[in-house]
């Protein structure tokens, strides 16, 4: 199956969902949260609310993911120069003007989703949000399905490559987390915290 026929099949499958206010609004919200990395900046801010290794790792991870995904996305867009879908869905989102492939929102979301979290639970939560970003971009017709698949693949590879580098340049993060766990009393389910 060619990429264009795959794109057409996905577009046709999503067509019945478009025009439904709740779904359109949800796609707009998710897309806007990912615009310029807003949701990732907020998450990094929450992670870094106390000084120490966790804050240092959050800042380094956010910077590494943001800069690298921007550079890679721009290079790929300049190389491919693909047109965006015609007749984008009317929604309260920034009108895209760059090349369609790869989806920059999706690339940055997947890259950050693999770099920013410190735990596997956090990674699953962040990757799930990144998948929602990808779906929103196709739903809004800001991208073809293959644009978001390409963005997800490139962003994932980039993020998985950056994660060990970020861990290497921010030593002590895991030790600090283990120390906090050791200080907690009880050890039951009530004492566990959800960490990204």
Image (spheres, rainbow, N blue to C red):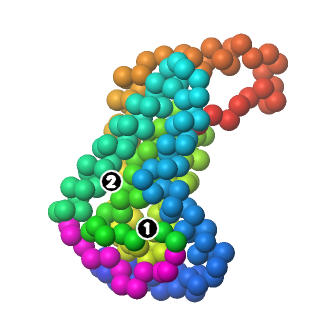
Instruction: Give the label on residue 34, or none.
Output: none
Where does the N terminus fall, quadrant-wise? Answer: bottom left
Position above or below: 44 against 21: above
> Measured from the top left, where is residue 26 in percent x and y?
61, 68
Mark 1 Cα shell of 10 Å, populated few (<14), some (14-19), many (≥20): few
Of residues 102 and 36, the one nearer the viewer is 36
Tag 1 and tag 2, C-beta contact below 8 Å: no
Question: What is the number of callouts on the image?
Answer: 2
Q: In this view, does 153 lie to the left or right of 185?
A: left
Q: What element carries label 2?
A: helix
- Quarter of the view holding residue 185: top right
* Residue marked by disc 2: 154
Q: What element carries label 1?
A: loop
Whichever of labels 1 and 2 marks the residue nearer the N terminus, that label is 1
Q: Can I make out residue 139 in this image?
A: no
> Measured from the top left, where is residue 31 in percent x and y?
50, 63
Position above or below: 136 against 54: below
Where does the C terminus fall, quadrant-wise? Answer: top right
> Measured from the top left, where is residue 66 in percent x and y?
37, 44
Magenta span has 138?
A: no
* Residue marked by disc 1: 94
Q: In this view, does 151 lie to the left or right of 123?
A: left
Position above or below: 63 against 130: above
> At 52% from the left edge and 76% from the top edge, which residue is drawn?
91
Residue numbers of the magenta segment? 80-91
């Amino acid at each position: 199956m060619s990429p264009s026929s795959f794109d057409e099949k996905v577009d046709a499958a999503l067509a019945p969902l478009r025009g439904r206010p709740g779904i359109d609004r949800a796609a707009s919200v998710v897309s806007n949260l990912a615009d310029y990395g807003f949701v990732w900046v907020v998450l990094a801010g929450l992670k870094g609310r106390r000084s120490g290794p966790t804050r240092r790792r959050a800042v380094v991870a956010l910077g590494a993911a943001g800069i690298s995904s921007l550079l890679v996305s721009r290079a790929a867009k300049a190389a491919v120069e693909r047109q965006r879908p015609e007749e984008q869905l009317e929604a309260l989102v920034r009108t895209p003007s760059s090349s369609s492939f790869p989806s920059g929102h999706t690339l940055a979301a997947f890259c950050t989703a693999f770099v920013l979290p410190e735990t596997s639970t956090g990674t699953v939560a962040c990757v799930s949000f990144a998948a929602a970003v990808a779906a929103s971009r196709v739903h809004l017709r800001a991208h073809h399905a293959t644009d978001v698949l390409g963005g997800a693949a490139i962003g994932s590879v980039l993020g998985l490559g950056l994660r060990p580098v970020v861990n290497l340049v921010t030593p002590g993060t895991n030790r600090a987390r283990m120390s906090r766990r050791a200080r907690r009393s009880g050890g039951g389910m009530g004492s566990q915290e959800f960490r990204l």
